[in-house]
Image (cartoon, rainbow, N blue to C red):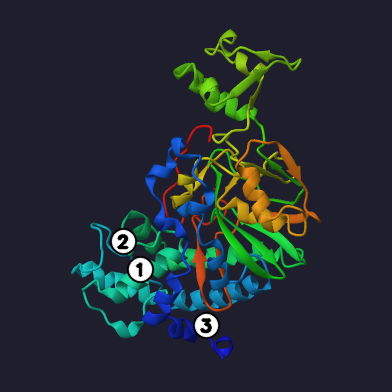
Amino acid sequence: MIRSRPLTDRFTTRLDRRALLGGMASLPALALATPAFAQQGRAAVAEWSDSFDAGSRSRSTRNPYPVLGPHTVQGLEMAIGQYQQIVARGGWQPVPDRERLRIGARRPAVIALRDRLIASGDLDASTGRSDIFDSFVDTAVKRFQTRHGISPDGQVRDATFAALNVPAEMRLRQLETNLVRVRAYSGFLGNRFIVMNIPAAQLEAVENGTVVSRHVTVVGKIDRQSPVISTRVQDINFNPYWTVPASIIRKDLIPKMQAEPDYLAKNRIRVFNGQGQEVAPESINWNTMEAMNYRFRQDPFEGNSMGNVRINIPNQHAVYMHDTPSKGLFGEDQRFHSSGCARVQNVRELIAWILQGTQWSRSEIDRIFRTTDRVDAKPLQPVPVYWVYITAWANPDGLVQFREDIYQRDGIGPQAATGMGQPVALR
């Protein structure tokens, strides 16, 4: 059986071209993203038809292992042994990044690329050291990109060069650091639980130790970080009001109103004073911090910053999970745009799973999404939720994943992969 073999043998077994191409079928549907969906004008497009919301269930069946659990501990322990061997052999050499590499290219740098992919087990050594970027290299690059959270287009550009050229020693330390983190969650987490991995910007719904669905998320910016928390789903708010946090009033809303005086009206945001009375926006001096004395609340509608649903998870940081009208953000590799909360791709599938056994069937959820009715729902039992910071993990079948240390918490030097996400205002 494959599981009885050493990790290095399993890498070789799994790296023939058929296996690699088969693995590509499990990739996120991010490559289907189209820029037009990023526009607010398209916010009313039905979520089920969005390419960003396709295929989360099929992905989970391809890889049933959650990022938290005994399988991850086992996988990390084996991966550490593998990377210790790589480091002992001298690691790998940098791949020259002077020009983009893609299928069909013939460059001396392709030889270095082949050596690098062979060293990490993404390319079988039997494919040779040719200077031609052939289909074997293309498939290996896509596998590498997938393991590092980069859209698998097979083209070696800045983000892929950066990930390729992180030294093996740093990757080993990253694995060791994250083994400690994962072991901290090695106890019983619940028969049904949610885990959101912040550096991966990905959420998993886990039942009886198996992932039943995966969801791309958008999480906190570098300067507004999503916290590590352990909590539970308290309730679900359909078509919620959104009360603008003080930090967003100060950093985003006031500058928006200075530049665009009708911004509140266009986005259906009302202003209330301390007595709960509505105040006209033009009565506020937007060139000062006077707005900080008021409460700002956005009405339910298709452009509401929380979309059609909010998932309440009580915690001291006042963060939560929610839908979004800006689904185009799910198509990005670097999904660090929020003020700490988590926006969830294909959120209907997630809340249908949370509300299993209640009156809230999938069709009923669909129906309420087509309205602006304010309705609340509770799960039969509170569902545990874990927001974690895991930048490296591995499956017991030998697949090792790395993500950028986006908040620089690994303590191992420069960030380890793609560039930082760019902030966006208010959404």
Label 3, label 1: how many angstroms apart (C-alpha)?
Answer: 20 Å
Locate residue 394, reporting x and y percent: 56, 71
Locate residue 426, reporting x and y percent: 53, 32
Crowd class of label 1 (few under 14; some 14 to 19; many from 20; radius 10 Å): many
Question: What is the residue that sits farthest to the bottom in this orientation?
Answer: 1
First reached walking from the N terminus: tag 3 or tag 1? 3
Quadrant of the image for the N terminus? bottom right
Q: Which mark is residue 329?
A: none
Q: Is residue 397 above or below residue 303?
A: below
Locate residue 286, reporting x and y percent: 54, 13
Q: Are marks 2 and 1 in contact (CB under 8 Å)?
A: yes
Residue identifier under label 2: 156
First reached walking from the N terminus: tag 3 or tag 2? 3
Label 2, label 1: how many angstroms apart (C-alpha)?
Answer: 8 Å
Question: Residue 191 falls in which quadrant of the image?
Answer: bottom right
The structure residue drawn at horizontal position 38% and vertical position 64%, both measured from the top left corner, is 164
Crowd class of label 3 (few under 14; some 14 to 19; many from 20; radius 10 Å): many
Residue identifier under label 3: 7
